[in-house]
Image (spheres, rainbow, N blue to C red):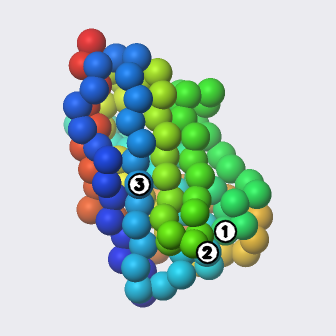
């Protein structure tokens, strides 16, 4: 069983940066592939970025490629999402997700994940 808690959301002006953290407990995050998803009001939940168990493979949605970076620190049992050049369209609740996986696989679909955090709000003002 894995418990995930997100930190780092908030209000930022367009062009600014935020760093989200996802702290895992109850199991070793190094055994899991991880993902960040987001859901804006009235829209479906969508993948933002994903990282393999090994950290050697990553995936980014086209809308965030070149602006966001996903990383993991297995020693701290934490996964990060560095968000730069934020746009009002990035406004959403951001969720961290986890699933047990082999070394280099990344997962893009929300149905692929077994554990979810409670979400953290990111609001980007224009």
Question: Camera-side residue: 6 or 113?
Answer: 6
Counting from the top left corner in percent of width and height, residue 108 is at: 58, 53
101 to 19, vertically: above or below: below
Q: Which mark is residue 53?
A: 1
User: In the image, what residue occupies the spot 24% across and 38% down?
Assistant: 10
20 and 52: which is toward the camera = 20
The 10 Å Cα crowd at callout 1, few under 14, some 14 to 19, many 20 or more, is: many
Q: What element carries label 1?
A: loop
Residue 88 - label: none
Residue that label 2 marks:
30
Q: Which of marks 1 and 3 is in front?
A: 3
Which residue is label 3 attached to? Answer: 21
For the N terminus, which image quadrant?
Answer: bottom left
- Crowding around mark 2 (Cα neighbors within 10 Å: few <14, some 14 to 19, many 20+) is many
- The residues tagged by marks 1 and 3 sit, at their Cα atoms, a distance apart of 17 Å
Hey, which quadrant is residue 25 in on the image?
bottom left
Dot placed on the residue nearer the N-terminal end, 1 or 2: 2
Whether residue 105 is visible: no
Asked if labels 2 and 1 touch by Cβ distance under 8 angstroms, the answer is yes
Q: Is residue 89 visible?
A: yes
């Amino acid at each position: 069983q894995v418990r995930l808690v997100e930190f780092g959301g908030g209000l930022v002006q367009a062009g600014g940066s935020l760093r989200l953290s996802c702290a895992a407990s109850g199991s070793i995050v190094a055994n899991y592939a991880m993902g960040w998803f987001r859901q804006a009001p009235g829209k479906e939940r969508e993948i933002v970025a994903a990282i393999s168990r090994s950290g050697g493979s990553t995936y980014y949605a086209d809308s965030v490629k070149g602006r966001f970076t996903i990383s993991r620190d297995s020693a701290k049992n934490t996964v990060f999402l560095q968000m730069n050049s934020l746009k009002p369209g990035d406004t959403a609740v951001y969720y961290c997700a986890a699933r047990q996986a082999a070394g280099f696989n990344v997962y893009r679909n929300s149905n692929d994940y077994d554990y979810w955090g409670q979400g953290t709000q990111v609001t980007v003002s224009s």
